[in-house]
Image: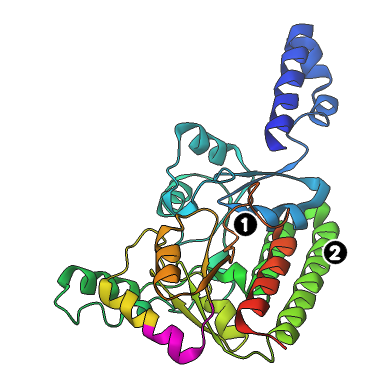
């Protein structure tokens, strides 16, 4: 989508140059209308930020994402081309703490409007419980990792519709300030998005209110905010880092907990290996299903956008928790 816009812009500039510098100067204001300069150019760090920018920016924004569809956001490295893209943008929308490479790149650019979604709501700790017992059998290295995660703020705020709505409101205000000519439209678009997120919150509240169990197992600890919002308990095989490996003690603990709490399903996700989740499920005689942390939309996603995938997540949770 955005690549196409940039190609159109480049074509327009090339055509104007062919007509001569005098012609370009004489109609620069007109040519700008067909190029990239008439858009509010936003570079977003990954899908949940890009989705907000597109929904709020509407026709006035040209949104590009630093993270490609299917790419694991935590592993992103910034290319020279992407750094240049950031420098040229009108605004950068990112979530500090999720992608260190993005944090560094944004801090080093002279971009005027830097919108940190983490500063628009309250971040909490959700990583410590997944590794509370990591050191019990002398695993010093794993214990150190647990202590490191214990102090890490959970960045997965977009999986809680209420927190995501708070971020949306902050992004809307930032857009209004940065591009005042279209402030009224940004305000209207933000209000519409917030209403949809509030409606989604109501669906989750009603859908998860009456369930046989409140405990669900996930591949990594992405669903802490969602669990807290709806009175559930997330037990993650790994911690906040989706690539971290669980200890043997942690796997045994989960097997025991599955029996005690009536857990039926181990959830895995589309962008990270499902090997550990499926091994645990097989050993504990549990089912598996997808609970999508929505870090990117791919052909494997159960929906084309944030709302469709969240609806699919609600359906999967209701089935796994025995909703009535």
Helix, strand or loop under label 1: helix
Residue 164 is left or right of residue 308, and the answer is: left
Helix, strand or loop under label 2: helix
Asked whether residue 144 is in view, the answer is yes
Q: Nearer the viewer, residue 145 or 6?
A: 145
In front: mark 1 or mark 2? 1
Residue 262: say if magenta. Answer: yes
In the rendered view, would you say 245 is above or below 321?
above
Which quadrant is home to the C terminus? Answer: bottom right
Q: Which residue is mark 1?
A: 49
Q: CA distance from mark 1 to mark 2?
A: 18 Å
Q: Splitting the image into 4 quarters, where does residue 236 fall?
A: bottom left
Q: Which residues are magenta?
A: 256-264
At x 19% / y 82%, what residue is drawn? 136
In the rendered view, would you say 88 is above or below 162?
above
Q: Residues within 10 Å of mark 1 (few under 14, many from 20)?
A: many
């Amino acid at each position: 989508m955005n690549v196409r816009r940039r190609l159109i812009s480049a074509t327009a500039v090339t055509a104007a140059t062919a007509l001569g510098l005098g012609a370009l100067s004489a109609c620069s204001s007109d040519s700008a209308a067909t190029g990239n300069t008439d858009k509010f150019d936003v570079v977003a760090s990954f899908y949940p930020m890009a989705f907000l920018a597109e929904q709020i920016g509407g026709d006035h924004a040209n949104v590009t994402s630093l993270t490609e569809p299917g790419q694991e956001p935590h592993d992103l490295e910034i290319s020279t081309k992407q750094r240049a893209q950031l420098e040229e943008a009108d605004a950068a929308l990112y979530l500090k703490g999720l992608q260190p490479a993005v944090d560094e790149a944004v801090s080093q650019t002279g971009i005027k409007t830097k919108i940190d979604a983490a500063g628009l709501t309250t971040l909490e700790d959700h990583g410590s419980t997944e590794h509370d017992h990591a050191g019990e059998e002398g695993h010093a290295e794993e214990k150190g990792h647990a202590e490191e995660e214990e102090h890490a703020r959970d960045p997965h705020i977009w999986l809680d519709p209420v927190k995501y709505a708070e971020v949306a409101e902050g992004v809307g205000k930032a857009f209004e300030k940065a591009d005042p000519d279209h402030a009224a439209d940004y305000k209207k678009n933000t209000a519409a998005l917030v209403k949809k997120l509030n409606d989604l919150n109501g669906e989750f509240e009603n859908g998860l209110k009456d369930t046989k169990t409140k405990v669900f197992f996930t591949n990594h600890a992405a669903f802490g905010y969602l669990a807290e919002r709806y009175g559930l308990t997330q037990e993650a095989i790994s911690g906040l880092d989706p690539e971290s490996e669980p200890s043997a003690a942690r796997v045994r603990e989960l097997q025991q907990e599955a029996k005690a709490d009536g857990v039926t399903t181990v959830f895995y996700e589309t962008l990270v290996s499902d090997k550990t989740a499926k091994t645990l499920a097989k050993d504990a005689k549990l089912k598996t299903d997808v609970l999508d942390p929505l870090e990117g939309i791919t052909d494997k996603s159960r929906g084309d956008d944030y709302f469709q995938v969240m609806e699919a997540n609600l359906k999967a949770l209701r089935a796994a928790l025995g909703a009535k």
